[in-house]
Image (cartoon, rainbow, N blue to C red):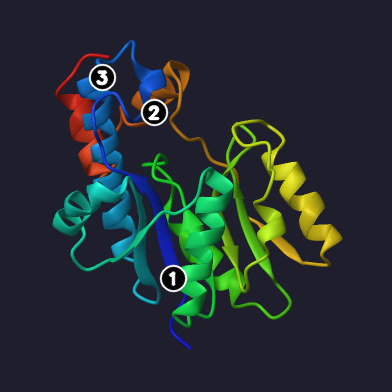
Amino acid sequence: MRPNAVTIMAKAPRAGEVKTRLSPPLSARDAAELYRCFLLDKIEQVRTLTAASPAIAYTPPDGRGFFEGVAPDFLLVPQRGPDLGARLANSFEHLFTLGHAAVFAIDSDTPTLPTAFLEQALDLIATPGIDLVLGPSEDGGYYLIGLRALYRELFEDMPWSTAQVVPETFRRAEGKGLKVAALPPWFDIDTPKDLKQLAASLAGPGGNAARHTRRFFMERTI
């Protein structure tokens, strides 16, 4: 079996196509630049997981060149499907077909997520009896989902972008008889309120953590 795959769900950082809810206060160009910083920080973070195989599930199809440039050492998987659920399920299927023992999908807009959470997820999925690892976001979604096998029921007809995503995922997992382990909650960046929370969290000393995102805020007044 191949090592566990850790896959960043990502979009090419194009103005007007990513983080649109952050405009205003950001311009469309700055929102895209901030998201590019998120991606660079997340790629650097995943690289530190030496026991995992790094991957990026990307969209749109013609965005591959960007990811080849910033992550030449990552496996690149084109996202396929009409909605987030299908794109997640198809990315899991692709990676399981390659022979990975477990697969994780993580978001690309939690630049301050502690690396220890990802390490904990890898430890949990290796624990006998654990079938699913979930990292809940403060808004009711999740920043991480890890599985030993694909269960499409966890992704189909899900009320995405609502506070029901995590409770509904738990309900469906319980119905399938899956044992779930949960990570601590964390915040992702979707709204101007989240942007302020991110800026405040980066205001103090933070070493090399989220260095690209930190530099973005150092160079601008939000």
| Residue shown at 69% from the left, 70% from the top | 131
Amino acid type, label 3: Ala
Of label 1 and label 3, which has the lower sequence position?
1
| Residue shown at 41% from the left, 19% from the top | 21
**Which residue is under mark 2?**
198
Amino acid type, label 2: Leu
- On the image, the x and y values in percent for residue 38 come to 30, 40
Gap between marks 2 and 1 measured at Cα:
28 Å
- On the image, the x and y values in percent for residue 49 come to 36, 68
Of label 2 and label 1, which has the lower sequence position?
1
The relative height of residue 87 versus residue 99 in the rendered view (above or below) is above
**Which residue is under mark 1?**
5
**Are there few (<14), some (14-19), or many (20+) residues within 10 Å of tag 2?**
many
Gap between marks 1 and 3 measured at Cα:
32 Å
- Residue 205 at least partly seen: no
Foreground disc of the pair 3, 2: 3
Residue situated in front as seen by the camera: 36 or 11? 11
Residue situated in front as seen by the camera: 189 or 8? 8
The relative height of residue 122 versus residue 168 in the rendered view (above or below) is below
Left or right placement of residue 9 versus residue 141 in this view: left
**Which residue is under mark 3?**
28
Gap between marks 3 and 2 measured at Cα:
18 Å
As helix, strand or loop, the secondary structure at mark 3 comes to: helix
As helix, strand or loop, the secondary structure at mark 1 comes to: strand
